[in-house]
Every structure is written in structure tokens, then in C-alpha cells.
Image (cartoon, grey):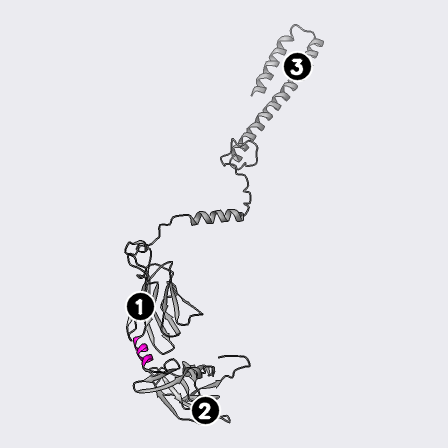
Amino acid sequence: MKKYILCLSLLGFSYAAESILNEADQAEIQRRMQLGQEQVLDTINKIQDAQEEREKQKQLQKENANLDSTSRDFSNSSMPYQAPAQPQEPPTEQEILLKKQATRSQNLKAIQNQFFSKNYTGTENTITIDYEENNTYKIRTRIAMTSTMIFPQKIKNFVLGDNVGFEVLELPNSQNTIAIRPKLIGVDTSLAVFTEDGKLYSFYVFSTDFKSWKNPHLVIFIKDKRTIVEKNKDPFFDEYFYVEEGINKLRVKKKEVYKRYKVKAKKQNTWLVPEEIFSDNNYTFFKYDKDRYPQIPSIYTVVDKQDSPIETRVIGDFVIAETVADKFTIRIGEAYVCVEREKFKKGETQ
């Protein structure tokens, strides 16, 4: 629009000048006006192009303001600039040691006050259990402590009801001792301990923490009065143990006991495998839970690859073959298993 207004003004000026100038002057003026008009129009076009370019740049800056994180001027960016994270160096040994010392120096206030009572004598955490058959005994444990149990005989096996809340530690150099360590607070379980003299000890074990006002059992001595009486009556108590039921009793010399037997059975006959096999110089003992079997297994010795019947007797859970042999066959109906005595290699001990 501005272009057209300017052009009309110049044309009006040219018509007024024609009345006072000659043709040559008018031609020169017309040439100069034409040249000036072209220069003015070119300048106007350049100004308009520059204005349009600035408008485009402003619009682009507005659109890219939130995405521009590389410009030197961050005043128009809504996203804060974050320098790239530098990799952290691992702590030195000295720093680790200082952190450990700081942790140890913290007062956790988890000390059980019962240990600092004025009336505490030091014997409160030790108990003695006089074993009686078919009884279950309570054992109070505490988190962060162990309860050590000492039995009158060597421990043959044990069964712990809960392996998540408790742990039983065996002591390799003390075969009549185990330790119970609770791993959780406020849980309970059962513990059954079998000793080599055939006795079963039953315990109810529960865990407490430092807030308990009762002392935990840290040392438990288990005494068997019957064992003590029998030991006093029997001069061979330390040398022998007994397989017995009621009035039936068979004495076994401990030094003669041999336990290295291997058993072979088909998959469908594994139920017939004895729980335990051992022998002395006169008998071979096969242990079966008599409440689980419909009939007593038959025992045969193997001679020249043939089964040969032998005399047996039953005392408690033991079927006792009245002989010692290298190979046996055990049968109930069509089911059978093979038993073979392993021989010592030179330098081996049982």
C-alpha cells in the first residue's frame, strides 16, 4: 500500500512541473524520478524482507526455547541445564575403615537389661533338663545369641521344624553338642534330637529379643537319670550298647560295630531299603519301622549267587540276622533289595 501512495505523489508532482519546464528538462526530471522510484521500491522491499525474516526468527526461538540446551544464553529455556555427571571414584580403604568405626560407635540401645540387674548371679542363663521319656522341653532363645545344648550321648541325627527362623550348628569336635541360633524374632518351632543310644529328645524352641524381661537359655545340659543308673549298675556300660524291647535285650560291643554296607534296589523296591544296617562279630542288624511294614522282611545270605535262608530274630525295630556275611538279600513277596558289605581299603578307617 505504501508503494502505491508514493507513486501517486510522484506522478502528481510530475504533472505540475510540465507547465513551467521545457521538454528536455522534463525528460531529465522524468529519468531521474524513474531511477529514484526504482531505488525507493528496492529499499522498501529489502526493509520488508528483513522485517519478515526477524519475525520468523522470533517465532523459531519461541518454539525451540524449551528444547535449546546447547545455546550460550539459557535465559529463554525452561529446562535447567545440568552438567554431565562425573564418575565417582571408589572409596579408599581408609574411608571404609572410618565408616566402619563410625557404625560401631553408634549406640543401638539393644542391650538386654536383665544381664545388668543387681540380682544377676550369672547362672540364670544355664539350665539343666532331667530327661524323661515322652516329655517336650521349652528352650528360650534370643536373637544375636546362641543356645548350646549338651547331651549325655553322641548325637546321631536331629530334625528342625523351621529352617527359616532358626539354624542348628553342629560342632565337629564335640559330637554330643549342638547350638541353636534364631534368625527371626518372635517365632517358634520344634526340635527332635536322636542320640546313638536310641533315645529321642523333644524340644519346643522359641525366640525373643533384648526387650524380653526373661533370661534366654544360653547353655542347656540334658541329663538322663536312667542312663546314669544303668551306667552305675552295668560295669560294661561304656563298652556296650543294647538293642532291646521289653525283656528282649541283645548287647552289642561298641568296638565291633561295622556300618559300611551298600544297598542296591530297583526304583519300585526302594521302599524296602533298611533305615540302618550294622553288624558286630556275631550278628547283622537291619532296622525297619515295624509300624510301617505289613510283614517282617525275610533275610537271606548269598552263597554261590544263590539265596540261602538263615535264622533271624526281631527285637524292636531291628530284624537281626544271626550271622555275618558279605552279601544279603532282603525280600517281601516279589520285592527285594541286595545288600553288600564294603571292604576297607588299605589305610582306611571306619
Q: Residue 62 in the image: x percent, y percent?
A: 52, 32
At label 2, the amino acid type is Thr
What range is drawn magenta here? 225-232
Q: Residue 109 in the image: x percent, y percent?
A: 35, 50
Q: Are marks 2 and 1 in contact (CB under 8 Å)?
A: no
Circle 3 residue: 33
Q: Nearer the viewer, mark 2 or mark 1?
A: 1
Q: Main secondary structure of the magenta part?
A: helix
Q: Out of 323 and 116, give the one closest to the viewer.
A: 116
Q: Out of 223 and 302, give the one closest to the viewer.
A: 223
Circle 1 residue: 128
Query: Against 323, is 212 above or below?
Result: above
Circle 2 residue: 301
**Neighbours of disc 1 within 10 Å: few (<14), some (14-19), many (20+):** few
The image quarter containing residue 277 is bottom left
Rendered residue at 61%/14% (across/down): 10
Q: Residue 126 in the image: x percent, y percent?
A: 32, 64
